[in-house]
Image: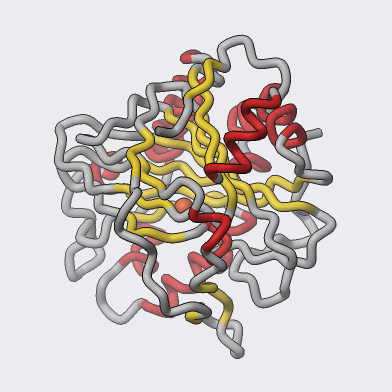
Amino acid sequence: MIPRFNAADFSSVTFEMKEAYSRDGVLVLDQMIRPEDCDALKNRMTEMVNDFDYDSHRTSFSTIDQKHAQDQYFLESGGDIRFFFEEDAFDDEGKLRVEPEKAINKVGHAMHDIDPEFNRVSRLPQLKELVYGLGMADPLLLQSMYIFKQPHIGGEVRCHQDATFLWTEPQTVMGLWVALEDATISNGCLWGIPGAHKTDQPKQRLRRTADDKGTEMITLDETPFQETGRLPLEAPKGTVLAFSGLFPHLSGANRSPKSRHAYTLHIVDKNAEYPEDNWLRRNDDLPARGFD
Ligand code: FE2
């Protein structure tokens, strides 16, 4: 059993919360984000998706030999707001098969520093208190993602650790996963392996290729993630899941008629070394910031 904490009146991290986070690698905080703030992000995202100019970015998504364009589009997304679609969203000519809002998989990775509404919610006082309270000395909000998990077609995300994607030495990445809608087993909530963050070293690392034009996944430990002990992390709207970068987690496909929108933030400690070959980079015109 993973304990749940009611965080409707959250003011600081309690001893029990700290203990749960350190033991399980994940902390479940119900009602931490008000429904109005969840809706504010959903509404803003709807506007952003509707404003997105598909035609000018069609090559980035076309299935015809556009790997490099896709790589560039992704590699530059660390300091921008970019739109990523479900795999079969485009036909051979790069045209969307369905309406944009039904075809989009996620948006990332700097909404929290570019868009005022995302900035506001990402830096709510309770989130700041949470991150400092869980022991991050000098937090940098490095990455934000809006994940749609579309009804019927939202794909599964295989078991992974977030340290794979945001490497620091030592490992410091912390994920905050905010349920903007109810996340249940049937619409593809997260699952995790409590306690495995203590035994599992990072199994893989995504880094830029030597020519800096793409990415490659390197395997550090071939042992597969354990199949046993995976528990669902159902999360009603407004719940925040905070987890360690080493916490193995996954999510199932969404075959239900309900969407499962979630907003995630990834935070690293400024004092840790951030390797140059990490995929996510910020330019000097948009340096990563903390909560202030
Ligand atoms: Fe993840």
Residue drawn at 38 percent across, 78 percent down: 67
Q: In which quarter of the image is residue 226?
A: bottom left
Residue drawn at 58 percent across, 34 percent down: 20
Q: In which quadrant of the rendered image does the C terminus lie?
A: top right
Residue drawn at 76 percent across, 44 percent down: 136
Q: In which quarter of the image is residue 225?
A: bottom left
The percent coordinates of residue 42 (x first, y second) are 43, 27
Relative to residue 156, is residue 180 depicted above or below? above
The percent coordinates of residue 130 (x first, y second) are 69, 30
The one nearer the camera, 76 or 148, is: 148
Q: In which quadrant of the rendered image does the N terminus lie?
A: top left
The one nearer the camera, 211 or 61, is: 211
The percent coordinates of residue 32 (x first, y second) are 55, 20
Q: In which quarter of the image is residue 275?
A: bottom right
Whether residue 288 is visible = yes
Residue drawn at 60 percent across, 38 percent down: 21
Relative to residue 15, is residue 9 depicted above or below? above
Whether residue 82 is visible = no
The percent coordinates of residue 192 (x first, y second) are 40, 47
The one nearer the camera, 120 or 290, is: 290
Which color mode does the image show? secondary structure
Position of 50 with respect to 168 (left or right) is left
Marker count (numbered) = 0
Position of 55 with respect to 10 (left or right) is left
Q: Which residue lies furthest to the bottom in this view?
A: 211
Q: Residue furthest top?
A: 9
